[in-house]
Image: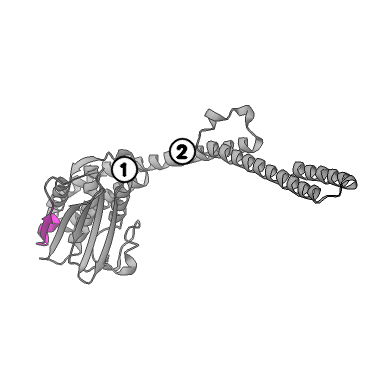
Amino acid sequence: MIGCTAAIVLLSAAFFVLWQFWESPWLIFGYILAVFAVCGIWFIREHRKKQQIFDRFEQILTGKSADHITDEHLTPTERRLITRLCELETREAKVQNGYRSISSLVADIAHQSKTPLSSILMYTEMSEHGDIIRAQTEKLSFLMDSLTKLAKCEGGLIAENLAPKENSVKELLRQVIEANYASVDSKNIEIRCDVPDGLTAVFDLRWTAEAVGNILDNAVKYSPEGSAVTISACAYDIFVRIDIADTGCGISEEELTNIWKRFYRGKNAENHSGVGIGLYLTANILNTEGGRVSAKSDENGSVFTVFLPKI
């Protein structure tokens, strides 16, 4: 700005000197043109300087500064920015490592608890209060399993172990139905499955079965005895759609956006077992592997829709 002002001052001085000898409209026109030229050149130079600064900051923020900017050419501001970024990266790495350590510890504790819980279940057969002990032990076992899954989800262990590849959608749903066979049979619920042969998508079979299984478990849990749950699948250009529809009590409209939150349990869940992490885990798994899940509900029941990528 100082250079531009100095140039205009010099032009003005030259203009007044020349005006003493040659009073002509062309002199005024030339003066105005010269002033505009100086301002234009200044504006272009300033714009280029700002763009260079933005480009250097972008290189620093994206980690490319080492290839393009040597340390001796860094400005004090850029050095402070790099130092601050390094501090933030180090802090984030420590936080992530802490989460992983805690999650691994919780998962190990929950896993080690399975053996004594199994022993307790075995000895309940010899107790006169066996039914009560068994019920409470099974509840504790369920809570430990839920804690294990939550720890893996919160610590990023699921994302690290996901290995999506092309798999059969029919095989996925077969595993999901088999895993929920006991609850389906106990309520005499009919599973209607309509899945085309040869339908494939890209997903991790183990974890996606866990995700879709949570949806089917909820559908069975909240459906009346003797009813039906319908599972259908179809292919689109870039994804496969799976619908799981039940005829249960449904979900109120204001709760639909909350069911994916951790530990959230709806009004209709009071008389059913659970801790409110099933659908949270489902959404986390599907989002991580490039899919998604949605839900809609009315007085006739609920429909959960899973989208899995094809490529």
Q: Is residue 66 left or right of residue 39?
A: left
- The local secondary structure at tag 2 comes to helix
Residue at the disc numbered 1: 158
Q: Residue at x 18, y 53 (%)?
A: 234
Q: How is the image coloured?
A: one colour
> In front: 126, or 165?
165
For the residue pair 72 and 100, the one nearer the viewer reads as 72
Provide residue 27's location: percent of width, then percent of height: 80, 47
Residue range in magenta is 182-195
CA separation in Å, label 1 and label 2 = 18 Å
**Amino acid type shown at disc 1:** Ile
Residue 136 visible in the picture: no
Who's the residue at 29% across and 45% down the image? 110
Residue 128, position as x, y percentages in the image:
14, 57
Task: Name the residue at the bottom extreme.
Answer: 299
Q: Which mark is residue 93?
A: 2
Callout 2 environment at 10 Å: few (<14), some (14 to 19), or many (20+)?
Answer: few
Magenta stretch: residue 157 in it?
A: no
Camera-side residue of 161 and 203: 203
Residue 247: tell me if it is visible.
yes
